[in-house]
Image (cartoon, rainbow, N blue to C red):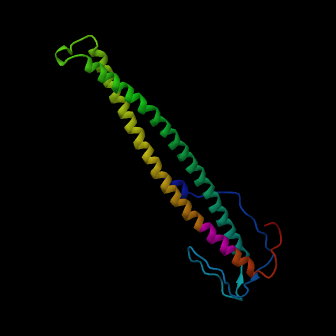
């Protein structure tokens, strides 16, 4: 599947938060949370340090996947530019060969088509067909790349909303901690 890499487990660099004890959840939050619903513990209920570590890990995974997605989009975009260049190079060739065929055909009346240049005309006609087929294939591939870019942009939007949601959740949980966590963040 084209998006298989989005759902495969990844092992990015993990954000580590060292917490020495269980924290009490503070007062009600005023933060607006969008995205998947995962309820926060009620005020006064202990929040295990693993909840914050889990959210940090999930956020790290989303950031890693976002980076992978952005690199994939750059690759597709680069391929699309290369295809556009190829299409630009093929169009003049097709036009030139078509002009040569037309000029040779116009030179001879239909009763005199069995002339030495007829083989050249047939060869040029075949070249025109080959170039037109290549052009059509390149344009089709270019359209497929554009479709993939649109799909990837959609995935970026989804990942960004999840990342923002995770950051908001972390912020809410961190604000409810009685003091700063000990150790590196």
- Of the pair 146 and 182, the residue shown nearer to us: 146
Q: Say how many tags the image has.
A: 0
Locate the C terminus by quadrant: bottom right
Most prominent secondary structure in the magenta stretch? helix
Give the residue at the far left of this rendering.
Answer: 111
Q: Is residue 51 above or below residue 84?
A: below
Q: Does residue 112 sit above or below 97 in this rendering? A: above
x, y (%) of residue 161? 58, 68
Residue stretch rendered in magenta on the structure = 162-170
Give the vertical position of 32 relative to 130 (above or below): below
Task: Tell me: 78 left or right of 1.
Answer: right
What x and y, as percent, mark residue 171? 71, 75
Q: Residue at x 20, y 17 (%)?
A: 109
Answer with the quarter of the image where residue 129 lies: top left
Residue closest to the eye, 151 or 17: 151
Q: Is residue 31 above or below residue 135?
A: below
Give the quarter of the image for residue 20.
bottom right
- Give x and y (percent) for residue 167: 67, 70
117 magenta-colored: no
At 70% from the left and 87% from the top, the residue drawn is 45
Q: Is residue 164 magenta?
A: yes
Name the residue: 73% across, 75% down: 49
């Amino acid at each position: 599947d084209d998006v298989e890499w989005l759902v495969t487990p990844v092992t990015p660099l993990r954000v580590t938060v060292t917490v020495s004890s269980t924290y009490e959840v503070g007062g009600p939050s005023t933060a607006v949370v969008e995205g998947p619903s995962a309820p926060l513990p009620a005020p006064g209920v202990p929040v295990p340090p693993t909840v914050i570590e889990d959210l940090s890990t999930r956020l790290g995974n989303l950031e890693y996947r976002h980076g992978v997605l952005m690199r994939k989009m750059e690759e597709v975009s680069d391929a699309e530019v290369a295809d556009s260049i190829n299409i630009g190079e093929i169009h003049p060739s097709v036009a030139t060969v078509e002009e040569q065929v037309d000029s040779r055909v116009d030179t001879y009346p239909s009763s005199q088509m069995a002339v030495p240049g007829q083989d050249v005309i047939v060869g040029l006609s075949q070249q025109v067909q080959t170039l037109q087929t290549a052009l059509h294939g390149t344009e089709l591939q270019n359209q497929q790349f554009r479709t993939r870019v649109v799909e990837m942009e959609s995935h970026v939007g989804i990942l960004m909303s999840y990342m923002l949601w995770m950051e908001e959740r972390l912020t809410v949980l961190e604000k409810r901690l009685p003091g700063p966590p000990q150790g590196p963040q």
